[in-house]
Amino acid sequence: MKAGVSPARSTARAARLAVDPPTGGTAPGDSPAYKHTQFGSVIAAGTAAGLVLATVVLVSLSPSTLKAAWWLVIALYGVLGAAFVLFWKLTVEVDEREVRFRFGIGVIGRVVRIADIARCDLIRTRIWWGWGLHWTPSGWLYNVAGRAAVRLEFVRERPVMIGSDDAETLKRVIDERMARCAKSR
């Protein structure tokens, strides 16, 4: 156990990261074999800093400027709020057939078939690649915090990287599903 981590906190984290026995897929009523949600601490901190800065700017505006550009204030808060709602967490699910990952409320995400994955590697993203969803020199990056990630390479598509604070377990589960998929061909 790490120094400074209470047994209750460690047990709660282990329970959150636990991998369930295979379910045979996610038919209605089934649960995925692996499901993990990571809170976007970097996204939340950036949004909070943006809101504070926007409030400071708002307070410093003259009444006449505020009256003329009221829509700008609403747009600024709206963009910051929308960014937080869309990217505040990253949920990754793996079942026998698919890897699903989605941000926030689920509007932005992707589904990848296990059969389409050619290779799965643990990587450490570059600090300047940042967080969120964007293209990097190593493929598309889906990440909300930290630098650990799983890189999925495909036969016919560009690679995808999924950031996770549980990247080792995610890689192990995907590797197991890839092996099962290869045996069933």
Image (spheres, rainbow, N blue to C red):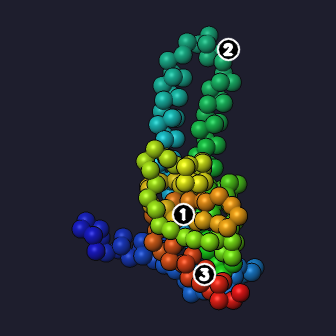
Residue 87 visible to an observer of this rendering? no
- Gap in angstroms between the C-alphas marked 2 and 1: 49 Å
Question: Image point 63% across, 49% down: which residue?
Answer: 86
- Mark 2 surroundings within 10 Å by alpha-carbon count, few (fewer than 14), some (14 through 19), many (20 or more): few
- Gap in angstroms between the C-alphas marked 3 and 1: 15 Å
Question: Image point 58% across, 66% down: which residue?
Answer: 152
Q: Which mark is residue 177?
A: 3
Query: In which quadrant will I find the C terminus?
Result: bottom right
Residue identifier under label 2: 68
Depicted 66 relative to depicted 24: above or below = above
Q: Amino acid at mark 1?
A: Arg
Nearer the camera: disc 2 or disc 1: 1
Question: Is 67 or 21 nearer to us in this picture?
Answer: 21
Using residue 65 as the reference point, say whether residue 56 is left or right of it. left
Query: In which quadrant will I find the N terminus?
Result: bottom left
Please tell me which of labels 2 and 1 falls first in the chain: 2
Please tell me which of labels 3 and 2 falls first in the chain: 2
- Mark 3 surroundings within 10 Å by alpha-carbon count, few (fewer than 14), some (14 through 19), many (20 or more): many
Using residue 150 as the reference point, say whether residue 2 is left or right of it. left
Please tell me which of labels 3 and 1 falls first in the chain: 1
Residue identifier under label 1: 151
Do the CB atoms of the residues marked 2 and 1 lie less than 8 Å apart?
Answer: no
Nearer the camera: disc 3 or disc 2: 3
> Dot 2: what SS?
helix
